[in-house]
Image (spheres, helix red, strand yellow):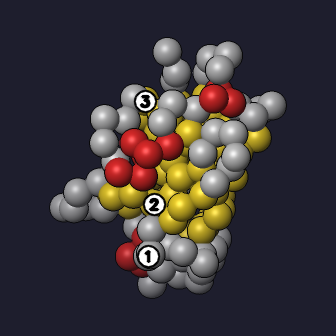
Amino acid sequence: QVQLVESGGGLVQAGGSLRLSCAASGRTFSIYAMGWFRQAPGKEREFVAAMSAIVANTQYSDSVKGRFTISRDNAKKTVYLQMNSLKPEDTAVYYCAADPQYARLISTTDIAYWGKGTLVTVSS
């Protein structure tokens, strides 16, 4: 079992930055691919970014590419999402996710573990 707890959300002005953190429990954090997703009010949950377990490949949605960076610290069992140049349309609840298979995070299919989310609000 893996439990995920997000933190770092809040209110920020457009153009600002935030760094989200996701702390994981369990001994085998390093073997899990990790990802971030978000859900805006009235919209479906969407993929934001993912990082594979071993090779540390990364993938981003087109809407955040060049502005957001995913990283992980296996010693701290934590994955981060650095968000720069924030826009009002980035406002959403951001969820951390983990799965042994990187492909499942990319395809948003049958993902094993989810956090409860942290709210990011970007004001114009």
Task: Bin the neighbour count of mark 1 within 10 Å (Cα to Cα): few under 14, some 14-19, many 20 and up.
Answer: few
Q: Residue at x 30, y 42 (%)?
A: 109
- x and y percent of residue 111 in the render? 37, 35
Among the two numbered marks 3 and 1 on one chain, the one whose residue lies closer to the N terminus: 1
Task: Bin the neighbour count of mark 3 within 10 Å (Cα to Cα): few under 14, some 14-19, many 20 and up.
Answer: some
Q: On screen, 96 above or below 14?
A: above
Disc 3 residue type? Answer: Tyr
**CA separation in Å, label 3 and label 1:** 24 Å
Task: Specify the quadrant of the image occupied by residue 88.
Answer: bottom left
Relative side of 75 to 6, left or right: right
Disc 1 residue type? Answer: Ser
Question: Is residue 102 or residue 38 the one in the foreground?
Answer: 102
Q: Does dot 2 land on a helix, a strand or a loop?
A: strand
Q: Does dot 1 land on a helix, a strand or a loop?
A: loop
Residue behind mark 3? 113
Say which mark, if any, is on residue 121. Answer: none
Q: Does dot 3 land on a helix, a strand or a loop?
A: strand
Q: On screen, 81 above or below 6?
A: below
Among the two numbered marks 2 and 1 on one chain, the one whose residue lies closer to the N terminus: 2
Residue behind mark 2? 48
Relative side of 76 to 89, left or right: right
Tag 3 and tag 2, C-beta contact below 8 Å: no
